[in-house]
Image (cartoon, rainbow, N blue to C red):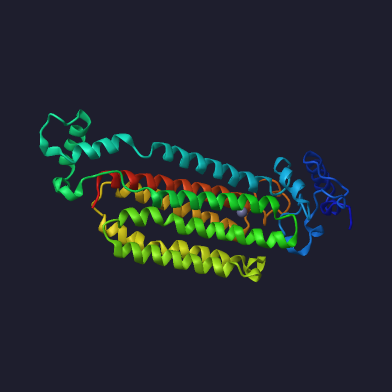
Amino acid sequence: MDPSPTLDSKLPSEAVETKKRKKRVGWSAAASSPCALVSYKELPEYMKDNEFILNYYRANWPLKQAFFSIFRWHNETLNVWTHLLGFVLFLGLTMTNLIQVPQVSDLIAFFTRSFPMSGDINVSHDSQEIFMRTTSTNLVDLKPESVVMPVTRWPFYVFLAGSMFCLLSSTVCHLFSCHSHHLNLSLLRLDYAGITTMIITSFFPPIYYIFQCDPLWHFIYLGGITVLGLFTIVTLLTPALSTKKFRGFRALLFSSMALFGIIPGVHAAIVNWSNPRRNVTLAYELGMAMFYLTGTLFYVSRVPERFKPGWFDLAGHSHQIFHVLVVMGALAHYGASLVFLDWRDTHSC
Ligand SMILES: [Zn+2]
């Protein structure tokens, strides 16, 4: 194996700069030593994915060294950390919501409001307040069957769990896929399964809460996206489709699942056009769509590294941008989900 760094044969100033950068991140010239970082040209064929990232690769590292490389600079460091921090963020959001539920005040309101006509003697201040709010919001809500209690949270937690699974599987994939060809293939498929799971589970809060009063649409939309998602996972489990040749095809599969959301999205906007929360949820969901769409464009086009190969090896390459945009898209969807929950807590069927 040629131990001389790839870029050193380029212009003198470029070579000096490359040497300086390699020194900063502990790049060893002895590329053949067990845990040295290597150049793209020195990679085994299965790891050659992005020819615009020239250096700082780990190749065939033992698992222990791969694990501890989380604290070292290489071209996957920020890919690992962007989704690891995203996972920790969503874990924190999940814990925060779990602590809040069951919301004691809402339960008290439910029990006291179950007997609103029994006189004021047993009606607490809280329940009176909520009763007044209900009265002023919508007189139809006074029907006995429309007594409001906190809406079920499981679709919300399905989304949070799906997001955490995606972010964690991506972290593991980026950390350990340098170990061996076999593990590389398995982890790539785990990563794709994680992305698919996140897309499928993202559908649960909006569809469940918007169409809560119409189980037929629950069945059609949630059933439809689940079938499409499972088809995608099974397709992506085919080893041949994990190669770089099929990057566009994978992006197409992920996009088609996301585009499937347009149908229930338009349907929901039509049936809820007069809902005062329409604009805020639309803004959140459009934000999510823009983040995911922009992220996919970076993922496919490999901008900016294609314009300056070697410049973005450590920081700023397309995959890192894609990772950050995925976390931002999930956060926007989380915001929309909170609005749906708040709405259904006060407006049941
Ligand atoms: Zn990734």
Q: Quadrant of ligand 1?
A: bottom right
Percent x, y of residue 323: 58, 50
Is 209 left or right of 323, judged from the image as shown? left
Q: Can I make out residue 50 in this image?
A: no
Is 161 left or right of 172, judged from the image as shown? left
Please tell me whether residue 296 is drawn above or below residue 88 in the rendered image. Answer: below
Q: Looking at the figure, which quarter contains the N terminus?
A: bottom right
Percent x, y of residue 100: 39, 37
Could you say which is closer to the camera, residue 290 or residue 108? 108
Percent x, y of residue 171: 62, 49
Could you say which is closer to the camera, residue 17 or residue 5? 5
Q: Can I make out residue 87 in this image?
A: yes
Residue located at (46% from left, 42% from top): 94
Choose top left, top right, bottom left or bottom right for residue 302.
Answer: bottom right
Residue located at (78% from left, 42% from top): 21
Please tell me whether residue 262 is drawn above or below residue 84 in the rendered image. Answer: below
Is 152 left or right of 333, judged from the image as shown? left
